[in-house]
Amino acid sequence: MDDCIQEALANYNIAATEIELLRHNENLTYRVGNEYLLQIHEPAEGFSAEFFYDGVDRVEIYKSELAFQAHLKKQVMQIREAVENRYGELITKLQNGTYVTVSKWLDGKSLDKLELNDSICYQIGEMLVHLHQKAKGFRVSTVKTYGKQHCECTKTRFQALENLGLSTEYSSIMQKCCDYAGAALEKARDEFQMIHGDLSASNILQTPNGLVPIDFSFFGMGHPMYDLAVLFGNIGGTLARRQQMAEGYRNAGGTIRYDVLDACFILTLLDCLGIHYEQWSKQEWFASRMQRWHKENLIPYVQGERIYADDFYLLHVQG
């Protein structure tokens, strides 16, 4: 990978100063000195998100992602700014066929490095509304959509995972959940807009100017509740956190649709399972956690029960 890094930086006339690997999931992400962020679009082993992009050209998705971020910047939103290579292009193709993007470094600490409190959780809700407001009206021709078609792709993913050890019992209930979530999202399709798609604690920076969303790799057209559901799953581990995020979201002008929130919450869980199954299924914790997800979330959902109460208490949790 060192050769790829050097080739990438040569395309941007960036001197190979101190280089630090920040993380590796859908991309290899590096900090280059104190000025740049380098992303090599090569997923980690076992990280399988190809079903997200069924029938969509990945290069066009990269272009759309950069166009979306440029739009947000024009809307006076603090955002990482993409950097052109020596040829005036924002996307670089390496000799091995891998794609690379570079952006200017944005100072701040990701929320996974901080101790979250009520104030930060409230600000997360506010930030989400501001993101959705500034994203309204933006359209591109090539983009993934978190709707019925995506649910069908996720359903196909679980069918394929049966060959990798996923039990037919779990696969069957997951596929039913895809059908139910897809139907709920289809009814709310008129409310779709551009969303971030992956708002975890590691994808939000605390900066001197407030919270900033980063890493739009999974951005797309979807219901705003998908972003809120991702936050609830990745950050809102306690009732108090969920309530604070929801309060910030509402007070900043956001509207919460409980039926769509439930569908999106289930879909975010299914998406995570589809992406990470090959990694997670090898871990000791996975079997017991899968049983809990099956009992506490998946079965109640296909039985027509609500997942979240009006106060954002997560129903059906057993201990």
Image (cartoon, rainbow, N blue to C red):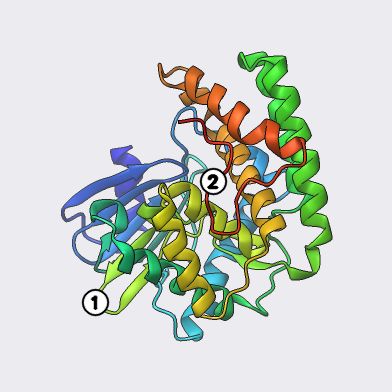
Q: Of the numbered discs in the image, which one, if any, rests on residue 80?
A: none
Q: Nearer the viewer, residue 115 or 151?
A: 115
What residue do we see at 77% from left, 55% from top?
185
**Tag 2 and tag 1, C-beta contact below 8 Å:** no
What residue do we see at 68% from left, 80% from top?
137
- Report x, y in % for residue 30: 30, 51
The N terminus: image quadrant: top left
Amino acid on which the number 2 mark rests in the picture = Leu
> For the residues marked 2 and 1, what is the alpha-carbon distance in whole angstroms?
33 Å
- Report x, y in % for residue 305: 72, 42
Please rate how many residues cluster around mark 2, counting C-alpha atoms within 10 Å: few if below 14, some from 14 to 19, many from 20: some
**Residue located beneath label 1 in the image:** 208
Amino acid on which the number 1 mark rests in the picture = Pro
Query: Relative to residue 159, is residue 252 drawn left or right?
Result: left
Q: Of the numbered discs in the image, which one, if any, rests on residue 314?
A: 2
Residue furthest left as drawn: 18
Q: Secondary structure at mark 2?
A: loop
Q: Is residue 58 above or below residue 134?
A: above
- Report x, y in % for residue 170: 67, 21
Among numbered discs 2 and 1, the one appearing first in the sequence = 1
Query: Relative to residue 108, is residue 299 drawn left or right?
Result: right
Q: Which tag is nearer the camera, tag 2 or tag 1?
A: 2
Query: Relative to residue 259, is residue 15 drawn left or right?
Result: left
* Residue 168 visible, this angle: yes
Quadrant hosting residue 283: top left
Q: How many dots with numbers? A: 2
Q: Nearer the viewer, residue 41 or 221?
A: 221
What residue do we see at 71% from left, 39% from top?
301
